[in-house]
Image (cartoon, helix red, strand yellow):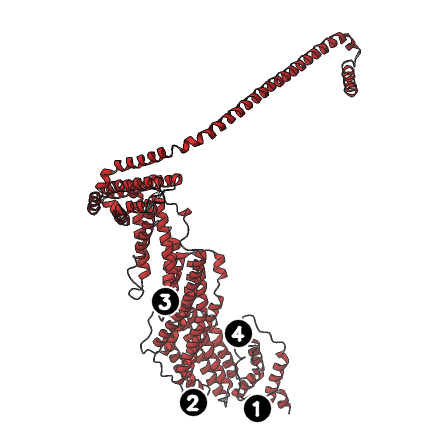
Amino acid sequence: MEEPDREAVATAVQRVAGMLQRPDQLDKVEQYRRREARKKASVEARLKAAIQSQLDGVRTGLNQLHNALNDVKDIQQSLGTLSKDWRQSINTIESLKDVKDAVVQHSQLAAAVENLKNIFSVPEIVKETQDLIEQGELLEAHRKLMDLECSRDDLMYEQYRMDSKNTHDMNLIQNYFGEVQHLSDELAKQLWMVIQRSITTVRKDPTLLVSVVRIIEREEKIDRRMMDRKKQTGFIPPGRPKKWKEKMFLVLEKTIGTRIEGSQAETRESDKMWLVRHLEIIRRYVLDDLVVVKNLMVQCFPPTYNIFNKMLELYHQALSSRIQELASEELEANEIVSLLTWVLNTYHSSEMMGNADLIPEVDIRTMKPLLSQDVVDQLLHKYMATLQSNIIAWLRKALETDKKDWDKVTEPEADQDGYYQTTLPAIVFQMFEQNLQVAAQISEELKKKVLHLCLQQMNAFLNRYSEEAQLYKEDHLRNRQLPACYVQYMIAVINNCQTFKESIVSLKRKYLRSEEDFMVSGSTNMDSILDTIASDGCRSLLDEVFMDLEPHLNDLMTRKWLAGGSNSVDTICVTIEDYFSDFARIKTHYKQKMTIKAHRKVVTEYIKAIMQRRICFRNADERKEGAERMIREAEQFKFLFKCLTSGFSEETDGLCDTIIDIAEVIKLTDPSLLYLEVSTLVTRYPDLRDDHIAALLAMRGDASREMKQTIIETVEQNQSQRQQGLNYTPIFKDIIVPSLPTLSVPKLLK
């Protein structure tokens, strides 16, 4: 107690010190003392009340413990008395065994008396029940069947109670009521027949379906009652539980499965569209059936059956099983597409499960997929592999068909603008379009894969196309008389290249949504191949032209040409014009390039004729005549190609001016100015070599050895300083001068 006292004193000192901090507070000491006294009295009163309450509780608890002890003693005494009385009554109970047996026998006899009427009339009731079943009076037949079963079950139960091991009497009763089980089976068959035709029955005679459901509900109640009695007594009548509700759903499940499987009317051998027809029939059946279930059938079943959702689940399971079977078969590419389109799109669309007539009972968001993702992936992989082989075969066949057309004696068809073409691009891209449209029905990802596959196979196809065009040219060169329309079909091949390029771009724009996808799937390589095919075709046609022109080109710069006895240039122009009347059927892009090449080729061949030293002018008159003839022919070429190019070539004048510039050197009458003219020519044409100049001077025939030496030395000195203009296209670079003694500086000095 010393420690609490010290803490109390210390606390009191602190409080007093807190109250008496200023002198003026001394006047309130008495007031403080009274206030503290009141607080002390209040605390003491509360403490006394609490202690008193605790004491009252303890007193009450002691009283209750005392009463409980007395009660325990009373119970112990009563149990002793009861035990004594029980031991004394054992003998009395054994003496009442006969009474007990009499009571049991009385109960059995009472049950027999109660069912006596039914027992004697069992054959008659069985006959009536059989007739009612055959007449379709199912409710009345079931009522009589229940009476028979009730009589049998009551008798067997009483026998079981009396002597459960007496199988002879049990069998006797069961045999007597043997037809009851047969009636039950017959009635069940009738019920299942109605259930199998429930979709049709509910439309024509919903009362019959309601009767069947009522019978099933009665049997379910009896099953529950029999199972409860079994738990209590261990007795269960024969044939119980019937579980007709469970069997009903099994019948529905089997019926739905059979209906879906039986909707396949054709096979692949009889109809290529068998799967499409099969799936369409399934779609109509399922949609119509579920609408009937929602609007009519649910009214015939208790709400606890949840019949619509149960039927929806059964249809979904049956569909899933059927689709799995179809997916496991060896399907063709178009059949895989039809199946996946139906599974992934049609099934959840407004044409089937998303139909307005099934909303809101059917929520497509919660429905499970008909096929697992693994199976879908396997089908897609198989489809892509099959499609690839099909595309390769289709492209090969299309090319073979097109090649056969190349040998025809009739010209190819022309498009609306008059350009020759074959059906190859249309056939190829129609095939691509069909496959892409089909793929787009399944998914965006598959559409991209198919497009990539098409472009990939197109790339390989174009390489084969190029090879076949080259072989076509080589076959023609062996006999230029065949094929009869070689030029026209080569033009069609060239035009096809442009059509292919446009179709590729169009295809990508149509089936690729984003610009990024468009760029990623670029067709640069195919454009390059197509340009190569077109360029080779144009070159082949030009080769054809210049093979015809070769004899006339060989007549240029000869004595016959100088004397005016040769109309080679007229023939050349007429021949070119004739060919280019056919070349007008080439699409503008390629025709422009081809015309420029032809123009350049003509000028180059003309200059080659000059450089081949076929003629050496003997005097100024011949030089003048030859130069003027060259100028006239250059103007003739210029006019021709202006007409052919329709003004789209800026090189027309420049190329022909090369001939005129050479003619001016030939025409020059003052040999002292020859050096200046040659220098000007070299300046304009930086690729002009010394052998070209030597051939040109040799053609003039009047240049002295010293003059030739001076000119060539100057050319060689300035050769390192020549610079070609930015827009200059070399023309002399590929012109080879025949191997004759050249006028090189060492030989001239020698």
Is label 2 in a helix, a strand or a loop?
helix
Is label 1 in a helix, a strand or a loop?
loop
Who is closer to the viewer here, 313 or 242? 242
340 in relation to 79, above or below:
below
Residue indicated by mark 4: 729
Question: Which amino acid, by three-letter code, is at mark 4?
Answer: Thr
**Mark 2–mark 1 distance (CA, rounded to whole Å):** 25 Å
Q: Is residue 351 visible?
A: no
* Residue drawn at 41 percent across, 52 percent down: 369
Residue 270: x and y in percent read 28, 65
> Dot 2: few (<14), some (14–19), or many (≥20) neighbours within 10 Å?
few
**Mark 3–mark 2 distance (CA, rounded to whole Å):** 53 Å
**Mark 1–mark 4 distance (CA, rounded to whole Å):** 29 Å
Query: How many marks do you count on the picture?
Result: 4
* Residue 549 numbered mark, or none: none
Residue indicated by mark 2: 560
Residue indicated by mark 3: 426
**Mark 1–mark 3 distance (CA, rounded to whole Å):** 59 Å
Q: Is residue 219 visible?
A: yes
Question: Which amino acid, by three-letter code, is at mark 3?
Answer: Ala
Residue indicated by mark 1: 741
